[in-house]
Image: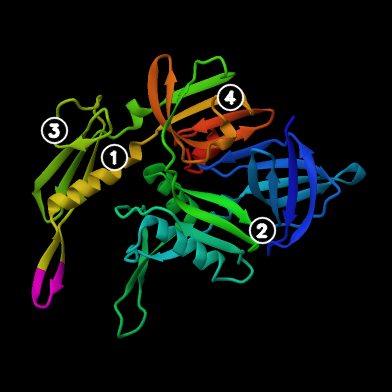
Amino acid sequence: MRQFNVEIFDRDMNFVCNTVTDNPKVREDYLDPEKYTVDLTGIQSGLGYFIHLLSEKEKYIGIITAFEDKKDGEKKLTICEIPSLFDVEMIIDVEDFDYSMENYIKKWIEALFKDGDSEMALPLTVNVSSETLNWSIDYKILNEVEEDEEKPPVTVAKINLFDDVILPAFTQYQIRLDYSIDLTQKKIVIDIGKNEAETIKIESDAKNIIDKSVIIRKSTRQTNKILVYDRENYNNFVTYYLHPDDSYDKNDTDRVSPVSYKILEAKKETEKEGDVEVVTKTFEEAAHEKAGENFSKNKYTNCITLKMISDDELINPSSLKVGQKVSIVSDEIEYASILSGRNVTETTELIFGTIRLELTKMLKGRA
């Protein structure tokens, strides 16, 4: 039996109350933050309060989004994961990408939830632990905004912080947000970076695995050939091929098939130094970078679930954090994947990969 201490804090991280509970059903899904419920007795609660569930091996942080009074002083709390806070829209300057992707996420979290609307403000400490420089996000231009006569127009787009920034940061670049509580400083601590733990191998056919599901979509969804045309001269183009080890180059041997290709554009980048225009990035360099950004979307396009007892000593599932890279062996074939969610009761179901099969998640574009 898993016994948890439960602590509840208000929006300013002031302690409200605590209790204990056995075997709470916890759900985590980085691709689509989940709701789950916990029944507790003898507690006080408010909407938007933080809840901290911790046992000897496990720690979970959530936000109370609803509660229902039941008999004998019992309350049913509905809890959302912290990432659900970031499902918000914002207007961005499409020229304002001169950051690492980790620092871009930090910039917007702090702008919206630390330095912006006081009613949205949260007691946050945001740290960055890795640096990803060559990155991009998808957006649609809204219009150009004239600031004043002395400044050039600003081109803006509307995006969703979670769907358009945080989610692709994970699926394409393996950048995850990790959450903890600093009781001394009364802060929610967010670490933005890659999980640098070494890749572990899991034998999915071993006796300690209660149940498994391995679904691979590489053959139908993976782009393995990219043609990049020079935007300034369409007679000039370069073709890149993906290889089985996930490397890519212009060599069309030992390549992934069947062919699934994409056509992209790139151009050289220049800047003026006095009256001289200097090339800072050649077309070939820009094309190679563009291909790399798109091939990176292929990583971990699988959905693998493994169920085991929660105190399994071979895998130790409670010690694995989101972003943990794994090599899963199934029927003597190895699949590279990444931990992206879990369902925990007396058993633990670990969820790996960057695709989901549920219809609701497909409709939200998070599959």
Which residues are drawn in magenta?
Answer: 271-277
Residue that numbered label 4 is attached to: 307
Residue that numbered label 2 is attached to: 183
Q: Counting residues from the N terminus, which is met first, the one under dot 3 or under dot 2?
A: 2
Residue that numbered label 1 is attached to: 295
Q: Counting residues from the N terminus, which is met first, the one under dot 3 or under dot 4?
A: 3
Q: CA distance from mark 4 to mark 1?
A: 31 Å
Which residue is located at x 64 percent, y 28 percent?
311
Which element type, helix, strand or loop, lies under badge 3? loop
- Identify residue type, mark 1: Phe
Q: Is residue 275 magenta?
A: yes
Residue 245: image x %, image y %? 27, 30
Q: Nearer the viewer, mark 4 or mark 1?
A: 4
Which element type, helix, strand or loop, lies under badge 4? strand
Relative placement, left or right, of 188 versus 17 is left
Residue that numbered label 3 is attached to: 251
Which element type, helix, strand or loop, lies under badge 2? loop
Q: Residues within 10 Å of mark 4 (few under 14, many from 20)?
A: many
